[in-house]
Amino acid sequence: MNAVSLQAGDELSTVVLKAWDVTDGADGHPFSVAQMKVQRAFQERHPNVVLEPSTGLQIPGRGADTTTLMQIAGDVAPAALYVNFRQSDTYIRSRFLYPLDEYIEKTAGTRIHDGHLMSHTEYVARLKEGPGYEAEFGNRMAPQIWDVIRRECPYGRECPYVARWGGTPAEEHRHIWALPQSQLVIALFYRRDLFAEADLPDRVPENLEEMLAWARKLHNPKENVYGININISAPGWSSLSILYSSGARVVEQDPDGNWTCAFNSPEAVDAYHFVARMFLEPFENDHGKFTGVVNVGDQDSAIRFGMWFSYIDQKAFAQFDPNVISFGPIPADARGNRGSEFNAQMTGIYAGYEDDIELRDATWEWMLFRGGPESQVIFARSYVESGLGRLVQPELLERAGYPEFIPEVPRGWSEAAAAALENGIPEPYGRNCQMVYRYLDQGIDQIRTDSEVSRLILEGDEPAARQRIQEILDRRVLMANDKMLNVVSENVRKFRARVAAAVTMAILIIFVVVFRIVFRAFSENVLRSEADKARGEWQFGRYKTAYLILIPALASIALWSYWPLMRGTTMAFQNYNVRGFSTWVGLDNFGAVLFSSEFWHSMLVSVYYTLMFMTFGFVAPIILALLLAEVPRGKILFRTIFYLPAMLAGVVVIFLFKGFYSEYGLINQILNMGVNAINGLFGTEIAHFTQRWLEVPGTALLCCMLPTIWAGMGPGCLIYLAALKGIPDDLYEAADLDGANTFKKVWHITIPSLRALIAINFIGAAIGCMQSGSSFILAMTGGGPYSPYGATEVIGLHIFWEAFMYLRFGIATAMAWILGAMLIGFTVLQLKRLSRMEFRAAGGL
């Protein structure tokens, strides 16, 4: 936790300030070196403030979108939070942020009474009257930023900040919630060397059609050269500038302030038809015949892209050689429209520390200094000292006193940045937009993998292809509005509530009946004699030592299992907020879950996953154990070989199998060996396999399951090997005398002897499969491919998305309870079997 302590003899208390943008400089990157210099300069001015990097609970590989939430949930949140456009509304409504009005007005040198009631135009005009505004905020506050940072207050008339500042209470009012640190705009980058080799002009294309034509001329996969890069793991963001240039928007806000998704407009269809052509349209150039100009395989350092979209900022551009790489404005569409994503790195003060005035003030000072004019000059000087002056914006070089380096800056930087800023459209920042790219990604994923879209584009039937794309986008928008924005009618909401009430009551009855059955089953089997019954059921005096030994285990189970279970029961009926502002919503969460087509699809995917695993994965360790038990020599060697996969880290297994499933992976190599043999023997011309198996809806789930079987087969077989040792040898000797073959001995002796162990493991494995599988699938496919639902999005992964991507903990908990009610039958069956079993020591009676 952040701490404030008074040092002996000091006039100022020492403030330990954790912030997301504090670095330790260990990576040696020029940006990190410059950041360290900024931090040292800040601490020279504020010697009582100790800057520390933000550390805490994180979800590996998921970035800042989930890191901040996990830190808040773990009570280790930094005082200076990272806030992006997509998360901003959610953070404000969740009351994670402290309003900055008072700080900004004080820094600008003005005091605006009841500024929270003013419009943006009026409020900004009043701020600019302050003598300090231009110096501190002139370069930070682009016109587009105000709609993002100054938003509706979630507290309404009861706003504690208005009361604290002596303002007029109002149900509808606005505050400033975040401070931009650096403005980012998207530009089109290109490789000058590849353009020169293809005899293309040293500039970006003027329009989208010219961009596609140039990409086709550059495309040469045989040499690892691809025309354009659309990041296959984030196609929604990678193609957002194409959407904006086509005149479309991702979300729109009506006059009443309600947000709706809009990426199914005619302009959006134009944009995504163009994107589909980039993926699917066949063409021919000097290097051969190809389909699409986008690399959809794994990203590789050996791959060179002719063009790609990226942010204009110092950190990103410092990774490239300006002699090889250049950039320019986003190409226009056929109507001459040009649009690019406008974004900004922003920070906010975590509201959980609002009562710690010293920490809050120190956080503001750091936020103000971090992106302020002095910090920018320090950055510029650090880059110049590192020999990277050509990578600094000309205006900043001028302010830092290095005008001599301006001629070395890549030509067109200022013009491209100005054009991008002029045409910049803010990244989606509406209600729950932290996961809007998920729906865009799924839509593009479905468009590029849809067989009908592929056929229509191949045939050149543009109207039919557009119609099919419209159908896909319409479905995605309906799902996003329901799932992300909760846009449903009042009648539908009431009907869902009635159904939810009936289902909730059924779940409650099921649990009561089940616990009664389990209790009676164990009670009947515990008291086995009249003597035991005469002594009583608990017999504390006789078994006091056993009870004492059980206390730590029971306490641990109660703390880590039953308390979260009870806590989760209340969360299922709440709109849960990790800061404590939870509100009761009754049965709305259950209603939303029961009528969620994505939930039932994920449940069905989990059933398929379980059936496949029980068919292949559950049987595999048993067969392997039987085979290893019969190996006459090298038992230790073979057991070690089969156990070794379990020793590999999960990430190693994931990347190993993802390589197998890729376009040029081991699977296709083996298949192509057969193709080559057939072509050589019979003179045929069968095409080679280039299938990306994780992108095929019919094979993706099986491909995700195979690594778990491969890695878990060895440890599983050891359990059965141990059980096989307990089977008396005289049974096999008697069978040999009777002339039984190996199959009959296995079927009539081995399997019956292992029946109890198999039965227990079978039920446990079935329950585990329904609840698991998420970790491997998350890393391998993320739940995709989508057509329209995730072909590999098992229920555990779906619940994870709900809880940590959408921040809908109440709905996620309701899903878990419904899943638990459906699995309770398996649990009862397992417990009843255990209650009837007798376990004896070897050789015992």
Image (cartoon, rainbow, N blue to C red):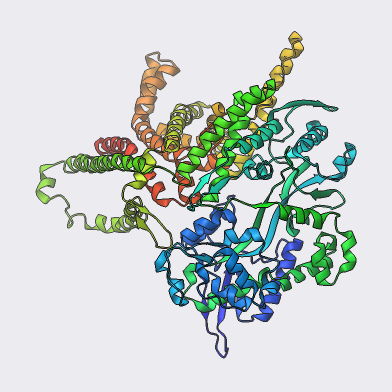
Measured along the vertical axis of the image, is residue 481 above or below residue 31? above
How many numbered circles does the render carry? 0
Write down the quadrant of residue 487 in the picture. top left
Along the line of sight, the residue nearer the viewer: 830 or 446? 446
- Which one is nearer the viewer's eye here, 554 or 99? 99
Q: Position of residue 723 (x, y in %)?
A: 40, 34
Horizontal relation, residue 636 to residue 280: left or right: left
Q: Position of residue 326 (x, y in %)?
A: 82, 49
Left or right of residue 761: residue 418:
right
- Between 90 and 82, the one lying in front of the other is 90
In percent of the image, x 29 and y 57: which residue is there? 549
User: Does residue 30 appear in the picture of this structure?
Assistant: yes
- In the image, what residue occupies the spot 59% across and 53% down? 63
Q: Is residue 60 left or right of residue 187?
A: left
| Rendering coords of residue 676 (x, y %) | 74, 17
How far across and how far down the image is residue 767, in percent? 38, 37
